[in-house]
Amino acid sequence: MVPTLAKNLDSLWMVIGLALGKAVLIMALLLFFGQKLMSKWLGMVARRKSQELFMLNLLLITLGAAWITEFVGLSMELGAFMAGMLISETRYKHEVESDIRSFRDVLLGLYFITIGMLLDVRLVLLNWWVVILLLIAPFVFKFIVIAWITRIFGASKGVSIRTGLALAQAGEFGFVLLGQLDGLHMMEPWMVNILLASMVLSMLTAPFIIARSDRIVMRFARNEWMLQSLALTQLARNAIGAKQHVIIVGFGRTGQNVAKLLADEKVPYRALDLDLERVRKAEAAGEAVSYADATKRESLIAAGIHRASSAVITFTDVPVVLTTLHYIKELVPTLPVIVRSYDDTDFERLKEGGADEIVPEALESSLVLASHAYMAAGISLRRATRHIQNIRMERYASMREYFHGETDEVIPDEDVQRRRHSLRIAPGSLAVGKTLRELELPSGNVDVTAIRRGDEKLKVTPETVIDENDVLVLRGTLDGVMQTEERLLK
């Protein structure tokens, strides 16, 4: 719109409408088709396993998107920005981030140095009161608008204030617009400098304001913070005696069903949920649930994450699940985490995020429906159950690998099924005093998944030295486990 406003046109509104129409069309095409094309293209490039080729394609995508937007009359910056948005939605965003980090730091430094070089300090000092006015007025206006919009969309008062404080400063696109205005001579040079100075000062104050945002929120939303602090204290007090319990993240219908099944077997649990009304009702009914945000490290620690036996995430909001997984694995890397998902589309993302097991609703519902259809068709209950169980074993790793007992039914192809087996190293055994590397276990047939020494669980590495009375948890085929047991106890 800026170049359009710079011209004296009779049909100004028609030109602006045409520009907006083109913008909407191009953005829709890029966002709709670009998303699908981006994932497939980057997948093809990544399979070549060439970092240089991957980097060249990132540059090609960014410059190509910038050229497209400039070609239709929009800014190059908008195209580059949208390319970044599209790339950030792919599974390769972490690799991209690590690859461009050095370029990003250098170019950002160069960008802000050039902005600073445009500043005429003498002119700013002569008009300091105008600079301060242009610093405060836009900040207050943006803060009010952003906090109001955030509040409308259901955020609490504290979150709205913090969001407004974080986003009220001048942004990089402000410099882009200012550069266009100056290039088209739509403003006097002295006014451009004053605006530039106010924007630079606004960005300069941003870190200090954000760093003190908690104090500001506490002043204006004290009740909310007191409630959160009390809730965290209450959670820690309720969970302080819990050991080997299951942490259930999300206490909706699925979370409540999991809790009922655990309670039936007298397995302790502690549920976390952010629906205050649901938590109050459940607590009144005697459920072990607390009002807490599982995406915060403090909440997980208060819930006894270091003493838990496992964690179950029952909601399907993938970004929130990934954040929760990140903090759980950061605090207790070895804790088993079971995640619910809608289908298999986010399987790889959740697996990379740290999920040990992923249970897709679509698959489970189809298996139950199929089992009923089998029986309606006259297939015996035993045969239908066996078929469904085989499918589950193929899908879930933890179902394929388990500790066998004398009462377990022998199934076909027993020799190729992977099983788990615990083995105590007796004094005088061949394995005592040797590392796992020196023992040379059958490659591909068996591996050591855990080593317990007394009450301590050791980290398994090729250099781990085996001691007498250590308990080794083996995983492998029947033949591999038997050969390994014979070798280690020799």
Image (cartoon, rainbow, N blue to C red):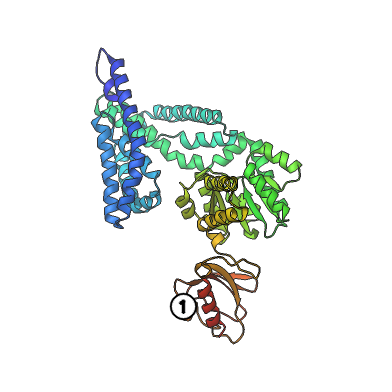
Residue sticking out furthest to the bottom = 428
Residue sticking out furthest to the top = 10
Quarter of the image that includes the C terminus? bottom right
Q: Can residue 21 be seen from the camera position used here?
A: yes
Q: Is residue 472 above or below residue 11?
A: below
Q: Is residue 28 above or below residue 8?
A: below
Give coordinates of residue 299: x percent, y percent: 62, 49
- Of the residues shown, which amino acid type is indicated by label 1? Arg
Q: From the viewer's perspective, is 88 left or right of 157? A: left
Q: From the viewer's perspective, is 186 left or right of 225? A: left
Count of numbered circles on the image: 1
Quarter of the image that includes the N terminus? top left
Q: Can residue 460 be seen from the camera position used here?
A: no
Q: Nearer the viewer, residue 488 or 456?
A: 488
Give coordinates of residue 432: x percent, y percent: 56, 83
Give coordinates of residue 190: x percent, y percent: 30, 27
Q: Nearer the viewer, residue 57 or 391?
A: 391
**Picture residue at 65% right of the left edge, 52% below the top:** 303
The residue singled out by tag 1 in the image is: 437
Q: Quadrant of residue 9?
A: top left
Q: Is residue 449 above or below residue 3?
A: below
Q: From the viewer's perspective, is 110 left or right of 288? A: left
Judged from the image, the secondary structure of the residue bearing numbered disc 1 is helix
The local crowd at label 1, few if under 14, some if 14 to 19, many if 20 or more residues have their Cα within 10 Å, is few
Give coordinates of residue 484: x percent, y percent: 52, 78
Q: Nearer the viewer, residue 438 or 264?
A: 264
**Picture residue at 44% right of the left edge, 74% below the top:** 443
Q: Is residue 75 above or below residue 375?
A: above
**Picture residue at 32% right of the left edge, 30% below the top:** 177
